[in-house]
């Protein structure tokens, strides 16, 4: 009888191992952060959907283990910071396992063994690492390829230039700003398959394992579910199908569209929905942040000319602090720094939405400059008018409202228009926190098709038309007020 039971269990064991092994979910939905341009692991296809090995894998594992996910694609650096700040529960972005990262993240079982490989232009004479002496090699920031280059820099005597994204790195190689690039082998070979005129003169070097990760000490069930799902997908053959879809010889991963994206019309025709979405976010950012900045700027501008020294001091500190911090750092501090600080004090994660963080950063930045515009406009009105009004017994507040501000407003209007144009341009900077506005939209498209010249020309025209129209509108309003 015992032998029959044991035999029955042995029959059931492989069945359970093929998909029934599951962990208990703790959250109703898990937010997974990823890169936005790291083909073939993750990239946007011609249908404007994120796809790739990582995207297919995490979706298949979530389905296998029965948990719900929401995927965000802010970019590699932003994805890492999002997990650290609590805005995301895990990250899957072709991320290599390193000792340094193990201090910050808990990793799953490896799902890919990575090789790093050197890429050069087809016309290059570089044929070995020794040929790199005194030359510049580009690498994506925070990758295992960067670690490899750093460890061997003194040996071969090359210079290293880091990039935030792959498209910028490959553009720099094509323009001659750098002499070579180092990247994950499938990524580099994918770029060649998409028309990059590159070659790989040196065989790839193993650099470690690629894995899914969570913030250290958090979401252990997510790691368990990933590992269980990965084991099941390997057992039933689904994992190999995912790899073959993107890595097998002749695999077509970039596009199923018949639209030719090598032309400007083709780029517009195939990506107009993305452009409209990015444009909407850009305009919303500019308009909302500038409206808030006007209110804050006027308040601090009035403080700066107040007869009370304490208010003048508060205004001076605000303007000096905000103008002294670069906008990109201010946005990063609000989006990642503040949530980390709150968590260190309360132990509770308090993520900030990227649009909200971008709006706050742009509002504060513009408000500091508007405060100075208001101060300058008020002080441009002859001081004798204030003195004459006060000598007639009119209060300070009424004098400002009825006499000084109407004159100062006419002087300030042109500067307000200029500041709004600057605020609109500054929206491109907040893409650093992963917000997909118009500029970031263009970078994501470039990462798929490598049409950087045409794409940046399209973006330049977009901004030129928008800023010109808004400037004309503002000048019409200015004339009416005058």
Image (cartoon, grey):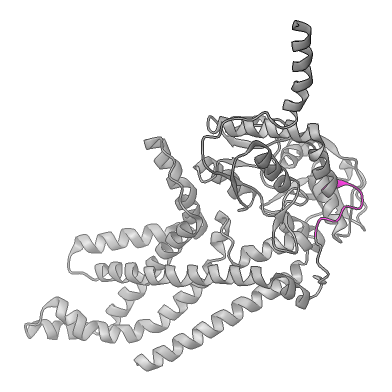
Q: Is residue 248 magenta?
A: yes
Q: Residue at x 45, y 88 (%)?
A: 475
Task: Please provide percent x and percent y for residue 449.
Answer: 78, 63
Q: Residue at x 62, y 42 (%)?
A: 91
Q: Is residue 224 above or below residue 243?
A: above
Q: Quadrant of the N terminus?
A: top right
Position of 329 compared to 311: left or right? right
Furthest-left residue in view?
A: 393
Main structural element of the magenta stretch: helix, strand or loop?
loop
Position of 207 compared to 293: left or right? right
Q: Residue 216 or 163: which is nearer the viewer?
A: 216
Furthest-top residue in view?
A: 2
Q: Residue 169 or 459: which is nearer the viewer?
A: 459
Q: Residue at x 48, y 56 (%)?
A: 331
Span shown in magenta: 246-254
Task: Please provide percent x and percent y for residue 332.
Answer: 50, 52
Quarter assignment of residue 222:
top right
Q: Is residue 374 above or below residue 91?
A: below
Q: Residue 10 or 254: which is nearer the viewer?
A: 10
């Amino acid at each position: 009888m015992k032998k029959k039971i044991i035999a029955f269990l042995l029959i059931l064991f492989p069945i359970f191992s093929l998909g029934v092994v599951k962990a208990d979910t703790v959250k109703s939905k898990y937010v997974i952060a990823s890169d936005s341009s790291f083909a073939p692991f993750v990239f946007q296809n011609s249908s404007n959907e994120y796809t790739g090995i990582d995207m297919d894998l995490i979706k298949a594992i979530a389905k296998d283990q029965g948990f719900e996910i929401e995927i965000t694609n802010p970019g590699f650096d932003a994805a890492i910071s999002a997990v650290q700040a609590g805005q995301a529960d895990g990250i899957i972005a072709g991320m290599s396992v390193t000792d340094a990262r193990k201090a910050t993240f808990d990793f799953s079982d490896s799902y890919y063994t990575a090789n790093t490989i050197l890429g050069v232009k087809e016309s290059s004479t570089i044929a070995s690492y020794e040929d790199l002496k005194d030359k510049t090699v580009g690498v994506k920031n925070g990758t295992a390829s960067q670690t490899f280059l750093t460890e061997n820099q003194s040996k071969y005597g090359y210079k290293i230039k880091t990039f935030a994204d792959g498209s910028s790195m490959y553009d720099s190689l094509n323009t001659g700003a750098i002499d070579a690039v180092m990247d994950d082998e499938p990524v580099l070979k994918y770029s060649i398959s998409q028309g990059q005129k590159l070659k790989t003169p040196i065989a790839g070097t193993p650099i470690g394992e690629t894995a899914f990760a969570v913030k250290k000490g958090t979401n252990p069930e997510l790691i368990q579910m990933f590992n269980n799902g990965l084991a099941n997908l390997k057992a039933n053959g689904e994992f190999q199908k995912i790899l073959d879809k993107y890595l097998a010889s002749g695999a077509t991963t970039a596009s199923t569209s018949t639209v030719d994206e090598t032309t400007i019309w083709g780029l517009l025709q195939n990506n107009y929905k993305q452009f409209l979405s990015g444009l909407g976010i850009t305009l919303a950012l500019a308009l909302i942040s500038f409206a808030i900045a006007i209110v804050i700027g006027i308040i601090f501008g009035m403080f700066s000319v107040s007869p009370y020294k304490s208010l003048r001091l508060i205004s001076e500190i605000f303007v000096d602090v905000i103008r002294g911090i670069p906008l990109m750092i201010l946005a990063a501090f609000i989006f990642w720094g503040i949530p980390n600080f709150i968590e260190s004090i309360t132990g509770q994660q308090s993520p900030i939405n990227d649009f909200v963080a971008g709006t706050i950063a742009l509002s504060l930045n513009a408000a500091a400059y508007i405060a100075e515009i208001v101060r300058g406009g008020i002080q441009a009105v002859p001081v004798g008018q204030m003195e004459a009004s006060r000598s007639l017994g009119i209060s300070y507040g009424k004098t400002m409202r009825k006499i000084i501000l109407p004159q100062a407003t006419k002087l300030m209007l042109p500067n307000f228009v200029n500041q709004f144009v600057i605020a609109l341009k500054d929206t491109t900077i907040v893409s650093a926190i992963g917000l997909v506005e118009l500029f970031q939209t263009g970078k994501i498209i470039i990462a798929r098709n490598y049409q950087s010249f045409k794409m940046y020309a399209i973006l330049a025209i977009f901004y030129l038309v928008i800023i010109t129209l808004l400037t004309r509108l503002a000048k019409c309003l200015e004339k009416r007020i005058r």
